[in-house]
Amino acid sequence: MTEETAVQDRKALFSPREMVLAAGCLVLAGAVGRWAGQDGGLLWVARLFDHPLLFGLLVLGLLAAALMVAVRSLVVRVLTGVALGLALLASFPFVLFAAFGAASETSDTAAPGRDDRSLVVEEGADMIDPLWWVYVDEGRGPLKQRWKVGYFNGDAAENALVEAVWEGPDRIRLVTGYAEDGTEQVHLVDLDHGTGRPLRTVTRG
């Protein structure tokens, strides 16, 4: 294969039309991910595709690359490159927060007498304040759904999540605050027996 043929193959492989098509596929995948990331959505779909910052940067990069390949004007190429660089620079703090402030799972407890329902607690941080998210995962395998139970921002002691336990297959007991300083509160959340959907959610902080 000659050098000219190789260059032509590379141009065909990364043509502007294909870049735009790839960007469109990413937009569609991101939309599916946002849908799955809503309350009661499919957990595995959300984990794969619910990453708006990453998908947004990839789409922006593909569209910018397509424009730079399709347009021969040096001015347009330079301006496109500068705009892309500024967008990446502006997104850098959000990338850092996503990388270092991401929530991590601290517990996953099956409901009494049920192996298709579990209580999940994730913990993260917002700069210096601890954060907690509480979920119920319902179902098995690819059909597993995630329901939001509570969100807690530990900016104050009375908002800190101290305990999240089952009080039965259809009831969750959440404890915030501390008995020592009189801020302890107990929150009971009942679940729909069939779907596992919480009948209410708890937000503190």
Image (spheres, rainbow, N blue to C red):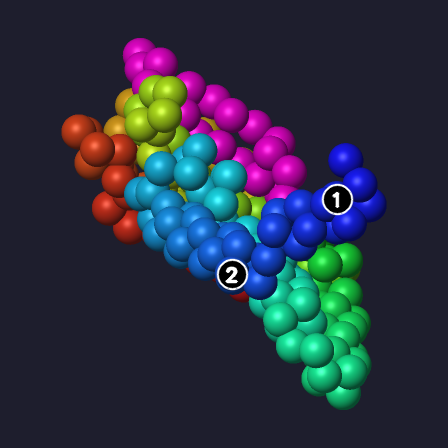
Q: Residue furthest bottom?
A: 75
Task: Residue 178: give x, y in percent of width and height.
Answer: 60, 47
Predominant SS along the magenta part: strand
Task: Residue 176: give x, y in percent of width and height.
Answer: 53, 48
Residue depicted at x 48% and y 32%: 120
Q: Is residue 29 visible?
A: yes
Task: Indicate the amino acid at tag 1.
Answer: Ala
Q: Check the picture and name the quadrant holding the C terminus.
A: bottom right
Q: Quadrant of residue 90?
A: bottom right
Camera-nearest residue between 112 and 148 = 148
Query: Element under label 1?
Result: helix
Task: Residue 180: give x, y in percent of width and height.
Answer: 64, 46
Q: Looking at the picture, does residue 63 appear above or below residue 33?
A: below
Q: Specify which label sits upstream in the sequence, 1 or 2.
A: 1
Q: Check the picture and name the quadrant holding the N terminus.
A: top right
Residue under label 2, please give it.
17
Camera-nearest residue between 64 and 124 = 64
Residue under label 1, please give it.
6
Task: Indicate the amino acid at tag 2.
Answer: Arg
Q: Residue furthest left?
A: 194
**Crowdedness near tag 2: few (<14), some (14–19) or many (≥20) residues, C-alpha within 10 Å:** some
Q: Which residues are magenta?
A: 102-125
Residue depicted at x 37% and y 20%: 141
Camera-nearest residue between 88 and 106 = 88
